[in-house]
Amino acid sequence: MRALLLLLIALTLSAQESPTDTFLQLDRTQRQTINRNNADHERWRRQKEDRVNQVRGEIFDETNRSPLDPTALGLRHAEVESICREMDERELQLVKVNRDVLTEPQKVKLAALEEVMRLAPTVNSAIGDNLIHAAPVSLSVSSFADLLLGLPQTWPAKQRTGVCAANRSTNLGLILPPIRIPQTTAP
C-alpha cells in the first residue's frame, strides 16, 4: 500500500513541471531520476526517524527509573546523535547525487540560484527597512527535489529538521546532575 502511494505521488510530481524544471530545463529522465533518488532517501529517512523516536521513548523510560543508569542514558543519547549525524551526511550525499544528474549548463544555472540565496538575508533586511517593496509571493512545494537542488553546498552548517531538529545539547540535563545554587540569607 505504501509503495503504491509513493508511486502515485511520484507520478503526480513528475507530471507537473515545477519552476525548477523550467529554470534548469530538466528533461523527463532527469526529473524521474531525481524523484527516484528522493523517494529512496525518504523511505530510508523514515526508518531512521522511527528508530530515533523509539530510542527517545527508551530515554524517557530510563529517565523515570530509579536509580538512574547514566550509562544506559548516555548510550541512548549517543545513538540518537549518531543517527542524526548519519542523516545529515546522507542528505548531503543526496544533494550531490541529484546534482550529478545535471548537465554543466544546468549546474551553472544552479550556481546562479545559490548566489541569489546568499543575498536573501540582505533582501529581507532591505524589505524590513522599507527600502524594497515586497510583492506577495505564492509558494508551492512541487517536489522534494526542488528543495534539495536549491541547497548550496557551501553552507557552513545546515539546520537540522524533523526528529533531529532539537537534538544538539537539549537533553544534557538528563545526564548531568542539576546545578544547585546555595541560598544565602539576607544580613
Image (cartoon, grey):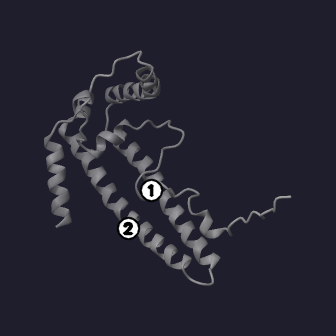
Q: Position of residue 30 (x, y in %)?
A: 24, 40
- Is residue 76 shown above or below 3? below
Residues packed near mark 1 inside 10 Å, few (<14), some (14 to 19) or many (20 plus) = some
The image quadrant that residue 71 belongs to is bottom right
The numbered dot on residue 50 is 2
Mark closer to the chain start, 1 or 2: 2
At x 71% / y 64%, what residue is drawn?
179
- Is residue 185 shown above or below 75? above
Q: Nearer the viewer, mark 1 or mark 2?
A: 2
At x 55% / y 56%, what residue is drawn?
168
Q: Residue furthest top?
A: 131
Residues packed near mark 2 inside 10 Å, few (<14), some (14 to 19) or many (20 plus) = few
Q: Is residue 106 left or right of residue 179?
A: left
The residue tagged 1 is 87
Q: Is residue 79 left or right of residue 140?
A: right
Q: Secondary structure at mark 2?
A: helix
Q: Position of residue 126 (x, y in %)?
A: 44, 20
Q: Is residue 52 left or right of residue 177?
A: left
Q: Residue furthest bottom?
A: 66
The image quadrant that residue 41 belongs to is bottom left
Determine the CA span between mark 1 and mark 2: 12 Å
The numbered dot on residue 118 is none
